[in-house]
Image: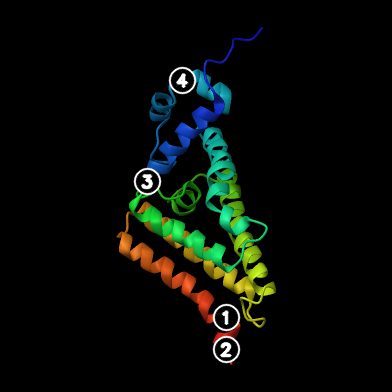
Amino acid sequence: MGERKQYDRTDLLDKAIELFRLRGYNGTSTAELVAELGVNRKSMYAEFGSKQGLFEAALERYDQRHLTAVLAPIEAPDAGADAIREAFASYASASTGWARGRGCLMCNTAVERGAPGPGSGRYVAAYLERIAQAFRHALGNAWRSGEIDPTTDLDQLAAFFTTALIGVAASLRAEAPPDQIRAACSVATSILDLHRPAAKG
């Protein structure tokens, strides 16, 4: 019989997520991972294969747990214009909270210079697509309920919100002034008002 594991895989991944989130892939050494995870190097490599393997597993865990929570408002079946406002309001609130200086692991990975290659790139691409599709979903609901002018290009608007949200996440990581982040979120959601049916004509 094999030796029983003395650790929980999801616990290791949650610890790795926070270390990678704070320091990035390149800024996190294997020695730091071993110390933070509380396992020896042999166990870490046996479980994940390599530092890159651990990083990709952490990205997958982050997508399933953290992003699902963050994107819940705009991924909900009945999401609409208010859900988009709620999503940005949540990021605005985070400007003085726990996420300040941490940002989003996926966003951090996307902008990290020399970030690891194809495997990680696949997760980042899926992250960008997921956000865009979530906004497109919420905008589609808003369009069908009459909250948005029928001539509005919803794909273009979803692309704008996606880029704006990523910019806000990067600003959180950079510890931008909270007033600046709140202002950016406010301006981003004000675009919805410009696309109300009554705002045209």
Measured from the top left, where is residue 164 in percent x and y?
48, 65
Q: Secondary structure at mark 1?
A: loop
Measured from the top left, where is residue 186 in percent x and y?
42, 69
Q: Secondary structure at mark 3?
A: loop
**Are dots 1 and 4 in contact, CB under 8 Å?**
no
Check disc 1: other Cα within 10 Å, few if <14, some if 14-19, many if 20+.
Answer: some
Mark 3 or mark 1: name the one nearer the start of the chain: 3
Q: Quadrant of residue 181?
A: bottom left
**Are dots 4 and 2 in contact, CB under 8 Å?**
no
User: Residue at label 1?
Assistant: 196
Mark 4 or mark 2: name the one nearer the start of the chain: 4
Q: Nearer the viewer, mark 3 or mark 1?
A: 1
Q: Amino acid at mark 1?
A: Arg
User: Residue at label 3?
Assistant: 98
User: Residue at label 2?
Assistant: 200
Marks 4 and 3 sit apart, C-alpha to C-alpha, by 26 Å
Q: Amino acid at mark 3?
A: Trp
Judging depth in this view, the residue of 23 and 200 nearest the camera is: 200
User: Residue at label 4?
Assistant: 39
